[in-house]
Amino acid sequence: MMPRMNGFEVLERLREERNTVPVVVVSANQGYDAEDLKVAGKVRKPVGLQQLLDAVTAALGTEPSS
């Protein structure tokens, strides 16, 4: 839980500011996917470190470093 706004409000603010940072959503909610939210990726909780790293790497379009 975020204290002042929810994730949907954060995404709205980022879009208002024309932010181009790729967003990976981490959520337990199954009611939507990355395409619905227009984000670079979505990872379902509980999330493992490798799963999160893979999603971020894919969102950035980079190869993982060794």
Image (cartoon, helix red, strand yellow):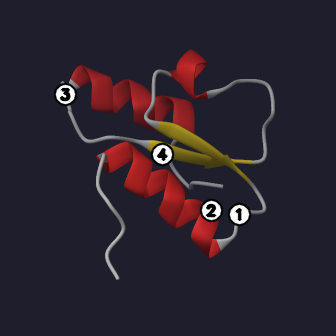
Q: Which residue is mark 2?
A: 51
Q: Which residue is mark 4?
A: 24
Q: Which element is circle 3 on?
A: loop
Q: Who comes first in sequence, dot 3 or dot 2?
A: 3
* Location of residue 62 with respect to 38 vertically, above or below: below
Going by the numbered disc 3, the residue's amino acid type is Glu
Viewer-side residue, 11 vs 25: 25
Q: Who comes first in sequence, dot 3 or dot 1?
A: 3
Which mark is on residue 17? Answer: 3
Residue at 71% across / 63% down in the picture? 47
Going by the numbered disc 4, the residue's amino acid type is Val
Q: Who comes first in sequence, dot 2 or dot 4?
A: 4
Q: Is residue 4 left or right of residue 18?
A: right
- Between the C-alphas of marks 1 and 4, the distance is 12 Å
Rendered-image quadrant of the C terminus: bottom left
Q: Which residue is mark 1?
A: 47
- Between the C-alphas of marks 2 and 4, the distance is 11 Å
Front: mark 3 or 2? 2
